[in-house]
Amino acid sequence: MVTKYDVFLYLADKGTAIKTPEVMKNFKRIKHEYQNIYHILSGLVKEDLATRSGKGFQVKLSLKSRLLHRLITYCINNGINYNHLIDVNLADFVAKALLKTEFTLKDFKINPKTFKKYTEILKRYGLIIIISTKPFKARITWNHLLSNILQYFDMPVFVRKENKIDFLDRIEKELKIFNRKIKQNETAYNALTEDFETRFIHSNLSIEGNPVTLPNTIKILKDKIMPKDLRDSDIKEIQNYQIALRAMMKDSRSGNALNKGKILNYHFLAMQHNEEIAGKLRKISVRIKGNPNFKVAPVDKIGFCFDQLMKRYDIFTAKRHTIKEIIDFASYFHNQFQYIHPFADGNSRVARLITFHLLQYFKIPILDIPLGILDQYLTNTKSYIKRDDRDLSKTLQLIILYNLKIINDKL
């Protein structure tokens, strides 16, 4: 079924006035559907998203139409069904959920089936974390996608003050379930990691400015189809990160600890499209783009700081630790590596690889950073104003809990 957002996107992409028959032809509609398409076009005019003239219908140039186009494009790029997410009733649900640290059905005066529908949509795209299923409890995290949806529907946004809750007990509970399930079905887990792989690669590289969409990333990595309109360098970056990711996964699953040589190799594999810097420590001063507050180690301190970090890593991994100690150290390890910033480029993507390796080395499965926590993660890492490893530790707890819940549900 053709929706108003489908028609709006077509008008926006055309950029000129279009008459109803042309819209029908694009969507392969037959004659008796003329009235339905005309009704959609007229509805866009009533919503002030389009204008009508003798030449036909055209998108109206306004803040609202630009925001809607940005929302739809973002959804397409990230494999999200915009017709599900851009919904005024769902937006109202999100606005109310954001007021709660954790929300349940009792917090909403809606039909249980509607509640389930909304939570399933948000869960599908990593926009909520399911804390427990019986009784159902979930947590929604603030991110720019939900912010833009609420803005589009002119909804006042009141966000609860962030409460840094410990999820350690829930993580331990889910880990017990995971350990039991993986013994029964390791093959299914291996297949699941492959499903997560493409999304992880896309989200990691999109953070770093790679413009390739999730659908095209799937074509490149799974279908081995190279879209002709993409730059070779962007495609190579995706392919190389997959090689580095798989090397990391193989090492962590085999129980191989990290060392300086392995980290240099991960960087080489991920950045081999740039031979001048791949696998080599930087010899130039660098800055985090867009964040003047982020301090990085001076060039003459890189070697010493890197060696000290690996010494701490060796001492830590030589002993058994609690879940809290592992996550706290992973947070320090991630942020300290980013401070050292040993490479001219590609530091953040390698920081995520080695942090994931550390957690998986201690048998904590982590396959992805969900879309809903991505903004929070960035705020605690490369976008921070002031470094706070404890804040990152709380964010990692959420990421780990999300991964465990998804993995256990699918196993």
Image (tube, rainbow, N blue to C red):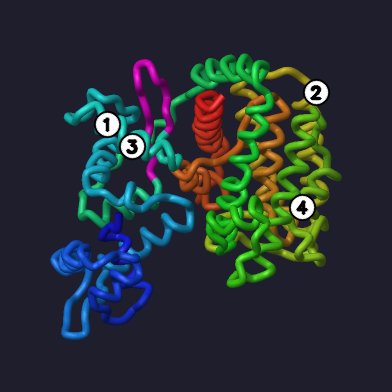
The label nearer to you, 1 versus 2, is 1
Tell me whether the residue at label 1 lies in contact with that at label 2, contact meaning CB atoms closer than 8 angstroms.
no
Mark 1 = which residue? Answer: 115
Up/down of 358 relative to 74, above or below: above
Q: Badge 3: few (under 14), some or many (20 or more) residues near its Cα, within 10 Å?
A: few
Among the two numbered marks 1 and 4 on one chain, the one whose residue lies closer to the N terminus: 1
Task: Estimate the x, y position of residue 7 in percent, counting from the top left.
Answer: 29, 65
Is label 1 or label 3 in front? Answer: 1
- Residue type, numbered disc 2: Ala
Residue that carries the numbered disc 4 in the rendered image: 267
Residue extending farthest front: 31
Q: Mark 2 points at which residue?
A: 318
In the image, what residue occupies the spot 36% across and 59% down?
71
Mark 4 packing: few (<14 Cα in 10 Å), some, or many (20+)?
Answer: many
- Residue 149 showing in the rendered view: yes
Q: Does residue 13 appear to the left or right of 177 in the view shown?
A: left
Q: How far apart are marks 1 and 4 (CA)?
A: 44 Å
